Amino acid sequence: MRSLEEIADRLEIQELLVAYSHAIDFRRWDELDDVFTPDAFIDYTAMGGPKGSYPEIKAFLAQTLPIFASYYHLIGTSKVDLDGDTATGVTLCHNPMVIGEGEAEHVFVCGLWYHDRFVRTAGGWRIRERVEEKTYVKDAPRLG
């Protein structure tokens, strides 16, 4: 039987994952400040992005994602293991992305796993580390 505290922790972590997706998908970059710890490490290299500190990655997202006309992050089947004030998690993500508009519109789809390390802070649960694992990319555009 799970305790009320464990249930609350799991719900808060699930909402944290949703907050990440919404911040990215609605291009509200400053909302990521409530998702990651200030010293978080993020590695997007598996899908062609950079790795680095949270401030570096936040700047990269704000600079790079506007080249896409639209996209969304469909997350699900998270497996979270709690250990006191820390936790680890693996979450799948299905991510269609649109580049171009009108007749030049091209849709491609990325499938990936997020491998996360969470920590409880004074402001609630945050992601301390995120590493992407590529599953597939379908119909990627040829850029350049």
Image (cartoon, rainbow, N blue to C red):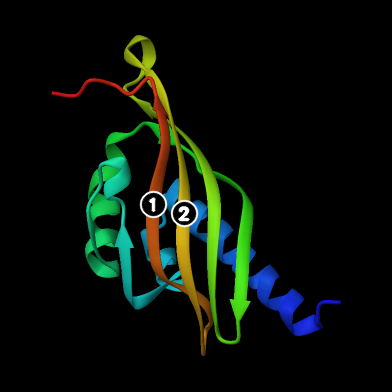
Relative side of 119 to 27, left or right = right
Q: Nearer the viewer, residue 37 or 111?
A: 111
CB-based contact (under 8 Å), mark 2 and mark 1: yes
Q: Nearer the viewer, residue 55 or 93?
A: 93
Q: Which residue is mark 2?
A: 114
What secondary structure is found at the residue carrying circle 2?
A: strand
Residue visible at 67% across and 77% down? 9
Three-letter amino acid code at the position of disc 1: Glu
Residue 100 falls in image quadrant: top left
Relative side of 10 to 134, left or right = right
In the rendered view, would you say 139 is above or below 89?
above
- Is residue 26 visible in the rendered image? The answer is no
How many residues crowd around disc 1 within 10 Å: few (fewer than 14), some, or many (20 or more)?
many
- Is residue 75 visible in the rendered image? The answer is yes
Residue visible at 40% across and 62% down? 130
Q: Position of residue 84 (x, y in %)?
A: 60, 86
Q: Position of residue 17 (x, y in %)?
A: 55, 60
Q: Position of residue 117 (x, y in %)?
A: 46, 70
Q: Which residue is mark 1?
A: 132
